[in-house]
Image (cartoon, rainbow, N blue to C red):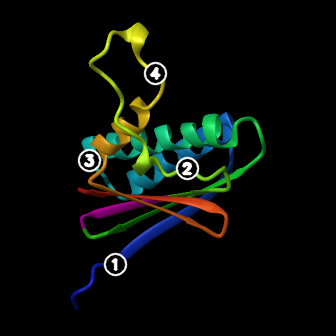
Amino acid sequence: MGAALRMSQTLAVEGTQAGIQKAVDALQAWSDRERLSDAARRRLLTALDEILSNVVRHGLAERPGLIEVTLSREGDVLTAEVADDARPFNPLLAPPPDTTSPLEARQPGGLGIALVRALTDAMEYERRDDRNRLIMTWRV
């Protein structure tokens, strides 16, 4: 026997606020089918909402684009891959945000990526076929 059954789902959405909402709704339904705990569901949905929002706001920056999200579960490991055709951006190379300086002296941005790092157990990035691919994993 040995290997656990891998359950996965892929969805493609437009790189818009409406596309993000469609993705979040589908992710919620998937997490319900997978019977994730409330804590695991919150970590997954918060991280994915942040990544999708960053792709739309910064990566695509008002131009049309397509975002694909693939969710899978194998035993107690969840994996989410977000692939987009936005400009190249490796979030793993982003410096940690400055949280020690006074607010008015800080550079804006970076908190979302720090949040995603804190919510995931592992992250990988690659640029392949002119697409960003961010792979996040969680143990549940």
Q: Which of marks 4 and 2 is nearer the N terminus?
A: 2
Q: Residue 113, labelled with which disc? A: none
Question: Residue 127 placed where, x, y %?
Answer: 56, 63
| Secondary structure found at label 2 | loop
Q: Which amino acid does label 2 sit on?
A: Phe
- Label 4: how many residues lie within 10 Å, few (<14), some (14-19) or many (20+)? few
Q: Badge 2 is on which residue? A: 89
Kindly report the distance in space between the C-alpha atoms of the residues bearing marks 3 and 2. 31 Å
Residue under the point 73% across and 49% down = 65
Kindly report the distance in space between the C-alpha atoms of the residues bearing marks 3 and 1. 19 Å
Q: Badge 4 is on which residue? A: 107
| Secondary structure found at label 3 | loop
Q: Badge 1 is on which residue? A: 5
Is 107 situated left or right of 76 in this image? right
The magenta stretch spans residue 82: no
Q: Which of marks 3 and 4 is nearer the N terminus?
A: 3
Task: Work out whether 79 lies above or below 93.
Answer: below
Residue under the point 28% across and 64% down = 77
> Which part of the image, by quadrant, shows the C terminus?
bottom left
Q: Earlier in the sequence, mark 3 or mark 1?
A: 1
Q: Earlier in the sequence, mark 3 or mark 2?
A: 3
Disc 1 versus disc 2: nearer the observer: 2
- Residue 112: quadrant of the picture: top left
Is 3 situated left or right of 80 in this image? left
Q: In the current view of this chain or complex, which residue is farthest to the right?
A: 64
- Label 2: how many residues lie within 10 Å, few (<14), some (14-19) or many (20+)? some
Residue under the point 40% across and 57% down = 33
Kindly report the distance in space between the C-alpha atoms of the residues bearing marks 1 and 2. 33 Å
Q: Badge 3 is on which residue? A: 37
